[in-house]
Image (spheres, grey):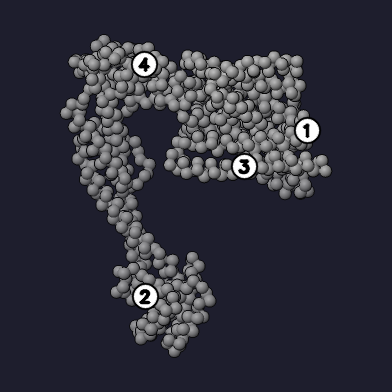
Amino acid sequence: MIVRMSKVEIAGPKAMRSDLLALLQESGMFHLEPEVRGFISKADEAFIRSMLPDEKELSERLFLENLLAKINELLSYLPQIEVRTSYIEPLAVIDLIAKSVRRHSEACRGLYERRELLRKEFDEFNRYSQFLSTIEGLFKEVERTPDLEFIGLTIKEPAKIDALRRLLASLTGGRFELTTSTSSDGTIVALITTEKSFNERIKKALSDERIPELSFPPSFSSLAFPEKIKYLIVRVSVISQEISEINSELEKFTCRWVPIYMQVIQWVNGRLSLLKASASVFESGSCFFIYGWMPSDAFKKAGEIVEKRFGGKVVVQEKAIREEDLERVPVVIKNPPYFEPFELFVKLLPLPRYSSMDPTPFIGIFFPVFFGMILGDAGYAIILFALSLFMMKRYSKAKNVKNAFQILFVSSFYAFFFGVLYGEFFGDLGHSFFGLEPICIERRTAVIPMLSFALTVGVVHVILGLFLGFITTLKRRMKKEALYRFLNLIIVICILLLVAALFDIFPALLTRPVIITILVLTPLLLFTGGLLAPLELLKSIGNIISYARIMAIGLTSVLLAFVANRLAGMTGNIVIGITVAVLLHTLNIILGVFSPAIHSIRLHYVEFFTKFIEPGGRRFEPIKK
Amino acid sequence: MEKVLIAFAAALAIGVTALATAWAQSRIGSAGAGALAEKPELSGTVIVLLAIPETMVILGFVVAAMILFGVK
């Protein structure tokens, strides 16, 4: 439900302004209004002005913003690890922190930049590491003497090895050795061992044949091939060691200092929000004025606290909310524990206006019903019930996940209820094993009765939406709009009666008065709703037909369950049969969670809420620490 | 022959609307994914937009059911 708000004016001597703002910040229930429009008369606006911050406040704000930027810079160099909570009083250490943050930042930046350089070097060297083990193996196979030259190669196509062997034979007259091996990524690594005098000739030929030589970083150029490999291995290990040392140093620093810095950040943010709030305070010659909004429940208590703290020198007054204020009233949504998890769905939509309605209770009532109607299987419901219970316990701290499984928990009850009504327990397994019979309808065969049922639910839901839309406009005293919505509602009902008469559900004798009613009301509808009003009528009818999805999605679910049982039976083997049935039922359960949920949400968002929710509400943003 | 025509009509009713829905959803889906990358807070609106064309195939299904099961 949308919490009732109070429009509040607070006035007192200027000297008490900071203390009062701190009190309001502590309460976390006051939404500050930076404009006086609507709070005082036009004539009085001339007597007050925005309170400008003094030099002390300005310098404090600059100091804190600067400190915050420095701490954030320091934190950007540190690893994101879980740290202890600090209970240090930030105000007592703020000067010390302001002095040390620069030093810490420089030290950490140095370590961070050094680590980045090392990582870059490591990545560069690492590219060769996959060849190293291969090349090393090849070295063991050849005899090393000072007059020999080693050339490393990478060969992509195995067919090229023979061509290379022929080429080397012609260049060296057979005075070479070619050994090959396959590296971990599948590339063929080759090592040519030959006399030093053939070196240049071979390299040129390799370049002409486009056979890439193993290239090493420029810093290796002075080293011979075997030394290059040795150096690479040593260097990679030194870099890894150095990186892990820097990491451990940064982690040690994080564990020691980040809890304190986090505590300071929290305090600085609170203080800054208070200083920023000061800009929304107004002053006259000797008094300050604060305007804003707070929940009506909290207003009385706040008045008593202010009275007690300031000894009657500060006055808290509630002002009447006028019609023109309605668009500016901040919106707070609060619901009983049962409906609270369903706020998850409402959060995905823009906030409703203060004068509109909170859709949470409606989605809390209808969503599980629609979900149950679509899934409608007692066996699946028991599994979902157990799953939601387990997940709620497991994710008790992750609020959104817990809420989602709470919704599933409630919905599984309805799925069980409708499952019993439809006589479904893992499809027709309940019927085969326990003789379970449908109490009211068998979905698999009764397509048309189920369609009628789904459409009837749609009629009730859409008409409720239209009625709520009428009530909303009536509450806002928008007479013409209210009349239009009322006429729309009546004509939709009349059209539905005519359709019902077509199917012999409604007495045909009464169709004439219904048609006359439609004809009489249509000009009025055009007058109140404009030329597009008939289009809205058609939209409402289309919305009702859209509820056929309840039956359509349900039918696919029940047929898939039926197929799972049939296929399992057709295998003729108990083990394979059970495996097939379990797999298909698992698939159906997964689909049975997502499909009904998405379609039920859609029915609410598109078909129901559009009838009465006015989006564009202003979020309640109290001054907080 | 009549049965064949009835079945064909029902298949057309659901087939064409399913294709239309798939086409519309593919366009909305790709645009929605792009929008979500920039503004994740639009997820509710994107779900709604994505679900709107489904009405076509639902209507097609209703018509097909009426053709097959002979509702007057």
The residue labelled by disc 1 is: B70
As displayed, is residue A566 above or below residue A215?
above
Q: Residue furthest right?
A: B1
Q: What numbered label is drawn on residue A279?
A: none
The residue labelled by disc 3 is: B20
Mark 1 or mark 3: name the one nearer the start of the chain: 3
Label 3's element? Answer: helix
Distance from Cα at disc 1 to Cα at disc 2: 86 Å
Q: Are marks 1 and 2 on the same chain?
A: no
Tags 2 and 4 touching, CB below 8 Å: no
Q: Position of residue A90 (x, y in %)?
A: 26, 32
In this rendering, which labeled residue sits more in front, label 3 or label 4? Answer: 3
As displayed, is residue A552 above or below residue A523?
below
Distance from Cα at disc 4 to Cα at disc 1: 62 Å
As displayed, is residue B30 above or below residue A120?
above
Q: Residues within 10 Å of mark 2 (few under 14, many from 20)?
A: some
Q: Position of residue A66 (x, y in %)?
A: 23, 38
In this rendering, which labeled residue sits more in front, label 4 or label 1? Answer: 1
Label 4's element? Answer: strand
The residue labelled by disc 2 is: A226
Q: For this view, does A445 lie left or right of residue A49?
A: right
